[in-house]
Amino acid sequence: MNPAEQTVHAPEAASSGWAFLYTPAWGRVLIAALTGLAMAVWWKSGNYATFVLAMVAVNVIVGVGLNILVGLSGQMSFGHVGFFAIGAYTVAILLRDGYSFWLGLPAAAAAATAVGALLAMPALRVAGPYLAMMTIAFGFIVENGLIEWKGFTGGSNGLMGFPAPMVFGRDMAEKDIALLAILLAGAALAFYHQLTRSRWGKAMCAVRDSETAAQSLGLNPVTVKTVSFALSATLTGIAGAVFTPLVMFVSPDSFPLHQSILFLLAVIIGGAGTLLGPVAGALVVVILPELLSNLAQYRLLIFGALLIFVLLAAPRGIVGALAALLPRRPCRRPNGGGADLAALLGLKGGSRLPLTVRGIGISFGGVQAARGVSFTAEPGRVTSIIGPNGAGKTTVLNMISGFYRPSEGSVSLAGEFTGMPAWKTARLGVTRTYQTTLLFEEMSVLDNMLVALGRGRLGWLLGSAGTPELSRKAEGLLSFAGYTGSLDALTGSLAHVDKRLVEIARALACHPEVLLLDEPAAGLMRSDKEQLSVLLRKIAGLGIVVVLVEHDMSLVMGISDHMLALDAGSPILEGPPAEVRQDPHVLEAYLGGADFKGRPRMQAWAGEKFAVLATSKLTAGYGAAPVLDGADLDVYPGEMVAVLGANGAGKSTMLRAISGLHRPVSGSVVLNDSPVGQSQAHEIALAGLALVPEGRQIFPDMTVMDNLLLGAFRRNDGQVQEDLEKLLTRFPRLRERIKSKGGVLSGGEQQMLAIARGLMARPDILILDEPSLGLAPSMINELYDILADLRDAGVTILIVDQMTNLALAVADRGYVLESGRIVHSGDAQELRADKSIEQAYLGSA
């Protein structure tokens, strides 16, 4: 075995008799054994059995090609019979014109490859049903082209009567063609086996799992998917080339569109992404009809039923289900504690350059998301970008990393790279992590690292991705990041904190000059955040430019060397953390300034103390540390209650848990004296709760009238029109736009529509999640005047909003969340005067 491909550590291999199952050599041995078995059957078979065996081999070749496309790169094609036909007709035409089959075979492969690459370039820029429709259209084009191009293809009559291929001066019989098909099928399986272990194969899997993350590691998804499509077409064309001398007749009827479905069916039934899936699928698709020859007219019906059964009983296919029964490979853990990380990353010697951002900005649909953002992030320092929700922090990171193209300004490192696509930006040394971890979840931890270590450069098609040197480097980076789990675990199965650590280690594997971190502490426990702080300081200590966006202000204040504060996409202040924290403009951005005037009640609320909504020890999260931890909250009839806290404190998670959009981990939710904590969202809505979610979530392609009527779709009290008229009187802007589609309204008008739609349900409690987010100041004031009117009219309201002072001005009571826990509660005016609330937003001074 090649030492560069050894994947199990020697001590573990010695202690486990089945460790050999997980080495590359095992796959090669298995392919050789299957090929030998097929040749033994071929040797003993008669004419009919030989033909069936040859058809199985041809389908295996096609299946391997589709497995590259479906199993590795995650693309779907319903028109692969077109490539099969191109290969078959290329050989038939060349044989007819007196050329050798051995010239026709590579010509068929080349023709299918060229057409596949040309089709892929436009087709793979779309996804989902659009890609499927394009491949179906391709199949129709090929089928009809064969009919209409009569002078070349023979039209509907097809081609026949061409000479048989020759080898060693004699004609090849059917048995010889069958042997060739078996050998080519074995070669195709060996090619796929090596491809899965190459940089290209791992890049295909990476693009399949997350195109966004792949781009941040320097991979160009269009190139990777085009190559996978072309390779898939190549193998399918080769299969078609063998099919022609096997049957000695080709016509358009030989390549119906439903044959593409059967090819795809074979891959899915056998097990997409598995080495032997195409073999199992081909056996089913070819041999089953032969066994059921008396039921030929029901063939597609039988295959359809079989597919449904396999998808239900074994979603990973026959081979995938059997592979799950094998013992797991020995657990390998990172062993790089003694590695010199600076040497691993090539950081020794020389000065490093700062990241310079000058006046960048961008607009979306006429809304200025960021404008005039400038800062310099120095090597060896942590530069943090802070600001309330909607401030434009992530937008700035997206512009720097190439996911958004700035409409103004420049970004430079060793030279300006403004407007470069993300994958090119990553190759310059700018890499990042994400708010929600974007790992390649169907790949192992080690494979995630190996993809990143390639830095977007894939090299030779079958070049191995896992050399001992790269594996040692991967282990060293994982150890440095603090990951101690299994190298072979699928990253989708990791605990949340381990996902964060692996994502940071993977970003470091790109040898970054600049590391952009978007909320790396989200969902971590306090002890994990402390370890993360140490890790980020160590990364900066290597001389890397670290740019941090984080909502945990205690963490930010503790590790930042420099800060930039944003609000509504514009810079407020740049400077040291202590200076930024104490600046009144920054405090106004987080808490709301004097420009916003909420109208308090004329008289203090004095309603009944029988809660419409109550939570007790409510805990909720997303598989990691609890985002909301033991929250107790009450809202009484006719009362307006505000829930406050910094970004990431758990406010929206609380609302989602209360409204049934997220199942609580523990605790209770009681609505009108009935427990609803385990109820579905629609059941809670019917029980009297209406949620106006963050971002409005109106139906953009429906009119204002239809949006409003949908709010009352479960009512049958005969007063819908009366309530509609009252709401249009309360929201005169909506009356003016009653026939307009919701998507063309301004942000403020959409927010009014969302609130009015919620009120149309006549809820017992109206819940508002960030209603002021993204609105102009004049619209915010108008919106809060309406909320004050609703409060005075006796509507029970629970509100979460970034405009803290404004929300407390109109609310009766408030709760303050910090790291998922309620740390303050009480009368709204008392909370408004409580200076300690600043700490919940901006951390300790």
Image (cartoon, rainbow, N blue to C red):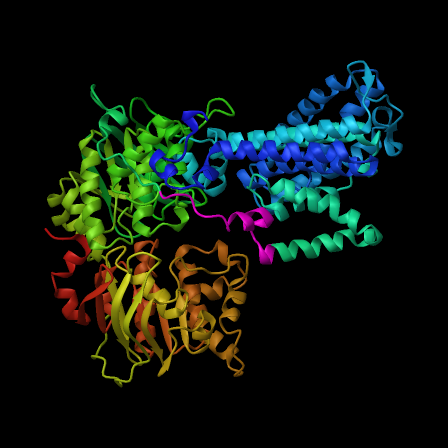
Q: Would residue 329 be visible to someone looking at this image? A: yes
Residue 704, relative to residue 228: is it above or below?
below
The number of numbered badges drawn on the structure is: 0
Horizontally, is 384 left or right of 117 in the view? Answer: left
- Which residue does the image show at 14% across and 56% down from the upper left? 839
Q: Position of residue 349 (x, y in %)?
A: 20, 19
Query: For this rendering, which residue is in front, 235 or 517?
Result: 235
State left or right for residue 765 relative to residue 322.
Answer: left
Write down the quadrant of residue 125 in the picture: top right
Question: Horizontal placement of 654 versus 403: left or right?
Answer: left
Q: Whole-percent x and y of residue 231?
A: 60, 29
User: What residue do we see at 80% from left, 21% from top?
Assistant: 165
Along the line of sight, the residue nearer the viewer: 648 or 72: 72
Position of residue 787 in the picture relative to residue 457 (left or right) = left
The boundaries of the magenta stretch are 311-331
The image position of residue 95, as x and y in percent, is 82, 20
Residue in the image at 82% along x and 54% along y: 295
Residue 513 is covered by the magenta coloring? no
Of residues 517 and 611, the one nearer the viewer is 517
Give the answer, above or below, for where 704 lies relative to 634.
above
Expressed as whole percent of the image width and height from the top left, the position of residue 298 reads: 79, 54
**Residue 331 position by quadrant:** top left
